[in-house]
Amino acid sequence: MEREPVHIMILEDSESDLELMKRELRGPCPNAILDWAPSKRIFLQLLDHVRPNIVLLDYSVPGFDGMTAMGMVRERFPETPIIIVSGGIGEETAIGTLKAGATDYVLKKHLHRIGPVVMRALQEREESEERRRVEEALTSSRRRFESLFSSSNEGIALHEMVYDDAGRAVDYRVLDVNPAFESITGISRKNAAGMLATELFGTIEAPFIGIYNDVVETGVPYQFETNFAPMGKYFLISAFSPEEGQFATMFVDVTDRISLESQLKKKAEDLARSNAELQQFAYVASHDLQEPLRMVSAHLDLLSKRYGDQLTGNAPQHLEFALQGARRMRALINDLLEYSRVESRGTQFAPVSLRRPVQQALENLSAVIGESNTVIEVGELPAVLADESQLVHLFQNLLSNAIKFRGVDPPHVVITALSDGENWLISVRDNGIGMSSIHSERIFQMFQRLHTHDEYPGTGIGLAICKKIVERHGGRIWVESKEGEGSTFFLTLPRTPDVPD
């Protein structure tokens, strides 16, 4: 990359000496821009209009001397290097110019040295500028750290490593702590500062010394969460090295969060156990109810067939109520059994085209589809990894609901599938009676019905079964609907790379 031009201001009354300087500077400073002042007047004009990188001053100019000129330069540009050029000044005078602020001096009989002297002065100036920038950055960083140190809500402690004669890290000493450290740990700054970690915490080995030594040696920050036994608390600790041989720790007390997470985990485990026990109970109870219910239903049917025409008054109506109740109970028990079997009796997932379970559901519902003049459109459906028998039940429930909750017009159901990258989005849209959006979550809960049994028969378990099936397959199900405008049930099923679409 091409270097920026170097602006060199020269106070020199001798044009011949100027030409000699130009020739000597051409090699080391090929991109130099020279501003020549042969007199005091022009020199002052240049000072007002030029900002030089370096100034060359003839020690003796008619009506003007180098020391006065150097003072003027220093007043305007304190950091600019100044080289005194003279035809013959003694050693004492030369040293005087250096003490007065000159960077260096060159005798005119040795003008061949002017190039190297200028380059050295510019290099020293550049290095000085770089040191100043680094120092300013360090000062700014230190101020920010000090501000953070004193005002942070996180506990902060500054330490230095302690090594044995073999150079192994054996302990670390606390240099300082902030107010938050005192508040969180209960240890005062007075008691902490200067203490070795083993003394402060009463341990045989300094806590986490291996981690902290790695941070000091590599300069790479490290964060970890731990149960700090000496205090009986959990902390999230971040360690970093602000200076060689030192490290700082920032930490927050996460004991309450860890405790809450532990409680939530225990509750989740308890809930999972309760759900498993509930599923087992539902299965056993439903299964054990099947036989006595069959006996009740059989005897009611027998009474109706043999003695139905002999009953008088309200007796036929009561008998019909009993038969309907037995049928509803059988449907309820069957749904409960199906709900409990979703997790416990489901088969292993295998690749299946969704068109197969949809087609099976349509065949199972063929009678009601024909009676209701239902029109069903099925778009392109993908293959997924699933329990095919459960998907048949899923689509059968959704299609049955679309037909059951129909409006004035014949039912019209559309089944489509789209990909969002990670999942397949399946939709089942109908033109039925719809519902208010306030019920969109409630309908997936057990035994939740929006209508009476006389209006629309059912157990109130069907959509709960759908939800459980979809969740077992790693997806979710929801509905979007408006009263009188139909409903669209959406469900997601994960895409699997090993299963071709």
Image (cartoon, grey):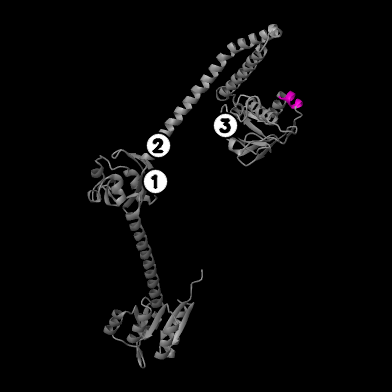
The residue at 55%/25% (across/down) is 343
Mark with earlier residue (2, 1): 1
Q: CA distance from mark 2 to mark 1?
A: 21 Å
Q: Nearer the viewer, residue 201 or 259?
A: 259
Vertical placement of residue 86 versus 219, above or below: below
The residue at 38%/74% (across/down) is 120
- Tag 1 residue: 223
Q: Nearer the viewer, residue 339 or 85?
A: 339
Quarter occupied by residue 146:
bottom left
Amino acid type shown at disc 1: Gln
Quarter occupied by residue 41:
bottom left
Horizontal and vertical percent for residue 114?
40, 80
- Tag 3 residue: 471
Residue contact at pointers 3 and 2, CB within 8 angstroms: no
Left or right of residue 258: residue 406: right
Q: CA distance from mark 3 to mark 2?
A: 26 Å
Mark with earlier residue (1, 3): 1
Amino acid type shown at disc 3: Glu
Horizontal and vertical percent for residue 169?
29, 46
Q: Which residues are magenta?
A: 365-371
**391 magenta-colored:** no
Q: Tell me if residue 247 can be seen.
A: yes
Q: Tell me if residue 496 can be seen.
A: no
